[in-house]
Image: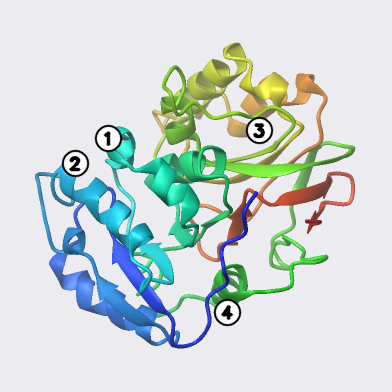
Amino acid sequence: MQIPKPLKQGDTIGLISASSATPPEKLQQAIESVEKLGFKVVVGETCRERHGYLAGSDELRAKEVNQMFSDPAIDGIFCIRGGYGATKILPLLDLDMIKKNPKVFAGYSDVTALHIVFNQIGNFVTYHTPMPSTEFIQSKMDDYTWNYFIHNVTNTDWSGHLLANPPERPMTTLVGGETTGQLIGGNLTLITASLGTPYEIDTKGKILFLEDIDENEQRVDRMLTQLQLAGKLDDAAGFLLGAWTNCGPENPEHPERSLSLPTIFNEIIVPLNKPAVMDVTCGHCLPTMSLPLGRTIHLNADSQIIKVVE
């Protein structure tokens, strides 16, 4: 697994959207939020384009990803937002070229589709992080979130680095035990959408991180069941379950007609008897952890300690 060169003050960031269009009123704030970190910014055309709900045509979005990786003047690539559309550009990416030019690549949510491809086919580490036009521009983004983001994209020494929740938000052990494996995953909806495609997620021997937003409990159950039937949960070495924002019952007035997320996890994840923790502070939430996808981690689910070991 290739480790992209860490960023440093003065490096140039390519700001792109491989997914949904960026609200015009948020663009300048997003640019300034990256500049305040000490980086120069090259704003991709996709940050200003709109094709319905997409940030320009599939061809434009794919071309821009290819250009940002091929341009030696670009040191890192930040996705300005998620939304929808990253899966549509996968066949248009020059993955041979991208594999030869690994760079810091950051984002989450719909960006999960690109994380999977860059980790598996590009063979380089990517970073599951908050994004400039969403979390970055929130005036109350906390120190925990900033520190984890900065550590991920700039750190040169990962030995013993802990993936730990804020002290006031403890993780919960779902299944005890210890395991070591490559950290992969992201948004459950995007991971499920990869099944049956040339870009299907490979979970064998890996530690799978999952999170989602705005999916009711029945849909979470359905997607986890699909992963189970596809063998992806059996193949995994362990699980990190993150934030499930607005993932409650379909009818909040009758929660008894639904199954709670803990019940779903107990019925699907627990019988696998593999180390698993839930309530990891990562996903569509603040504060939020940033994750180095593709790095090897050690999970001690009994003590809820997650350590980067590679």
Q: Write down the residue under mark 2.
A: 58
As drawn, 234 above or below 186: above
Residue 8 in the image: x percent, y percent? 53, 82
Q: Helix, strand or loop at disc 4?
A: helix
Q: Residues within 10 Å of mark 4 (few under 14, many from 20)?
A: few
Res. 262 mark:
3
Question: Which mark's residue is nearer the viewer, 4 or 2?
Answer: 2
Q: Helix, strand or loop at disc 2?
A: helix
Q: In the rendered view, does 195 fall on the left or right side of 14?
A: right
Q: Earlier in the sequence, mark 1 or mark 2?
A: 2
The front one of 104 and 56 is 104
Q: Write down the residue under mark 4.
A: 143
Residue 72 in the image: x percent, y percent? 38, 69
Question: Which mark's residue is nearer the viewer, 4 or 1?
Answer: 1
Q: In the rendered view, does 286 fall on the left or right side of 289?
A: left
Residue 292 in the image: x percent, y percent? 62, 56
Contact flag, marks 1 and 3 (Cβ < 8 Å) = no
Q: Residues within 10 Å of mark 2 (few under 14, many from 20)?
A: many
Q: Earlier in the sequence, mark 4 or mark 3?
A: 4
Q: Amino acid at mark 4?
A: Asp
Q: Residue at x 82, y 49 (%)?
A: 298
Disc 1 from disc 2: Cα separation: 7 Å
Q: Earlier in the sequence, mark 3 or mark 2?
A: 2
Q: Amino acid at mark 1?
A: Lys
| Colour scheme shown | rainbow
Disc 4 from disc 1: Cα separation: 35 Å
Q: In the rendered view, does 167 fall on the left or right side of 82?
A: right
Q: Amino acid at mark 3?
A: Pro
Disc 4 from disc 2: Cα separation: 36 Å
The front one of 296 and 264 is 296
Q: Helix, strand or loop at disc 1?
A: helix
Q: Write down the residue under mark 1.
A: 88
